[in-house]
Amino acid sequence: MSGMATEGSSAANQRVVENLASRLRRRQVVGSRETALETVLVLRQVVSKARFSNIDQLVEVIRSVGRKLVEAQPKEHTVGNTVRKVLHHIREEYHTATQGTTAAASTSRSTLSIAKFVLQGQPRKQNAPPKASDETRGTLKENDPDDPDAFARTLKPVLMEAIQDVLDELETVYDNISKNAKDHIHSDEIILTIGKSSTVEAFLKSAAPYRKYTVIVADTAPSYSGHDMAQSLSSAGISTVLVPDSAIYALMSRVNKVILGAHAILANGGMFAITGSLLAATAARAHSTPVVVCSGQFKLTPQWNLYHEYGALDFADPSSVLGFEEGNLVDKVDVVNPYYDYVRPELVDAFITNDGDHPPSSVYRLIKEAYDDEDYEL
Amino acid sequence: MPPGTIVAGKDGSSQFDIFATYQSILKNEEISTPLAAILALTELIEKSNAGTMFELVKALNDGAEVLKERTPNPISLNAGCELFIAFAYLFPHDSDSFSGLKTELVKQGQRYAAEALTYREKIAKLALGFIKDGSVILTHSYSRVVMKTLLRAHERKRISVYVTEARPRGLGLRTYDELTAAGIPCTVVLDSAVSYVMDQVDFVLVGSEAVVESGGLINAVGSNQIAIIAKAANKPFYALAESYKFHRLFPLSQYDLPTHNPSILSFPLSSAATAVSHSPSSIGPSGGKTLTSEGPRFMTQEQVACNPDVDYTRPDLISLVFSDVGSLTPEGVSQYLVGMFAG
């Protein structure tokens, strides 16, 4: 039975991965949270069925899945981020599981060096390896020739838990971001937002019962997702004003705060966000209006894009800017309809995340904590 | 001074001259001053007959003091000494004997110095991701890590470089020579032409003498004005710094730097006396001959001496610091320093 299961499971794994990859490629799954969720689910299935007899094999299995998905849609940064996050959690679980057996003795002295000292600061008490007390952990055996599945069998339950943690984080992300909303929004404030970010939507709505405030929503051409946003906010009882994008600058002098959503947060504290965000952020800067970004930490991306200026090199269908009914104009002009703006870190005052509020300058540290350095390139 | 300390200091009566050791280590072109200081200190430990930690740390501090006093610009050297002494101080003492601990420290120092030689390569690789094909880069004076980065970038991308002359030592010309020899299009610009050239430039890339706790940069004089101009023109200003150049210093102004002394920027006591003496005693024009008596004039040695070697660039002018521990925002540097030196 086991032989058949292996064949079957690796084929099944492949199928799941290919399925998501093609849906990503065709843009049937879009949006940073949606893609992240799908990625975790695929990884959960892959890990649950994968066969491996040591940690390196497991990491390689996950990485190759990650590579495939990222290649299918490099613009959805959260796919890669989720894979990195899962790898990070898995390594952590592995280290706690093995600490009792192998590593403990050799940690303190021989690994201490000046380079480490620079990197990790002073060796502290709590960094010392815990005593090997947990006997159940001691049974973890890698590369057991008699029973190659022993390693996987022992480790899998904790791995599943680790993946579940990532999933839970994604599922509770809106609640955790919104829980302090009423401390950020004050009564009688006028808030401007652009596009329809589910995070911002949840954030604004959760403050509504406590505060009476007005939201100005830019209509966000050419997708006009601002219309949906305005609809949703006003149906939640928030006083809402819908304005054209071109009015953002003129209205900014009356705005107390700009709240934006993000598509991805980059390592320098800059971000990709729906087109128009840069316009709003720049106008806010001109009026010294604070710009606050609501985003889950799963959007933290340990990457840099050199080609920020060109709207993250992701372009939408030009027909929403210039339709084919304008036939004689279409072949005379180039139409560019970028999805995202790159907003420089200087233009953002704070990121409100599911784990605290952070200035752009400490984003790199969050990234260092969330992922392992070796996974920056999958 | 306890009899155990071998470094007798300025009186020269010691058998071991740390400064001479330091100088001979520096003859190796690849080794930068902080590393040379670390190596000199390891040698000091080797020669020292200190029998307790207290004596050893005192000997190290005295040695660092000697190096500092005998070097005209001790900033980056200080960074190295500081790192090694802090490490030695915190190193767990679980050797069988004190001499065992000493050999272990020496080994650690030497291993680090060897490892640190790879850091420039690491930084060059990191910075490469920020250099676009067709970039025009402005750099200042001469820096080994900047050279490594530019040469590395040249292998993969088309770049062209403007380099400042960096008076009075003219180190920018060395950058020019080496880049041109490697086939990189390069032009030397006057230090006073930086704002003229800035609009043509994609970003500024400079090396460093030290990166301080505020996240600010200490580098060859002129870096600060380049950073200010880059900021005004909205161009990124990147600094490259190996992590052993992180220095626990918090200057609030130019005059807080340890290199500042009363003679820098001083006014002559009697203005009449100096007004007469502008014989071009220092570096003359290359030909040495001018067509008219009104030919170019140069500062005298005394006038040059009233000028600083390094200046301090505020952190808000710096876009990023590339180091072997990653590309950091200026604030990030202070976190590393706090990790190393604060409880």
Image (spheres, coloured by chain):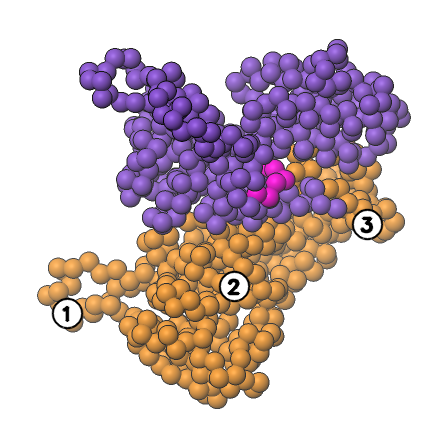
Residue plotted at (62% across, 61% down): A166
Under mark 1, the amino acid is Glu
Give me the C-alpha separation between circle 1 and circle 2. Answer: 43 Å
Q: Is residue A283 left or right of residue A101?
A: left
Name the amino acid type tagged 2: Ala
- Badges 1 and 2: C-beta atoms under 8 Å apart? no
**Residue at 40% across, 29% down:** B271
Total marks in image: 3
Q: Is the residue at mark 1 from the same chain as the one at mark 2?
A: yes
Residue B237 as seen in the image, left or right of residue A182: left
Q: Position of residue A114 (x, y in %)?
A: 69, 33
Q: Is residue B11 visible?
A: yes
Q: Distance between the residues labelled 2 and 3?
A: 42 Å
Q: Mark 3 sits on what residue? A: A137
Q: What element carries label 2?
A: strand
Q: What element carries label 3?
A: helix
Q: Specify the quadrant of the image occupied by residue B340.
A: top right
Which region shows up in magenta?
A: B245-251
Q: Which residue carries the number 1 mark?
A: A326
**Chain letter, disc 3 residue:** A
Tell me which chain the residue with mark 2 is part of.
Answer: A
Q: Which chain carries label 1?
A: A
**Which sits in the foreground, A270 or B37?**
B37
Local SS, label 1 = helix
Q: Which of marks 2 and 3 is nearer the N terminus?
A: 3
Labels 2 and 3 in the same subunit:
yes
- Rendering colour (chain B): purple
Check disc 2: other Cα within 10 Å, few if <14, some if 14-19, many if 20+. some
Q: Are marks 3 and 1 on the same chain?
A: yes
Could you say where residue A224 lies in the image, as x and y percent from the top left?
33, 74
Q: Is residue A161 a member of the stretch shown in magenta?
A: no
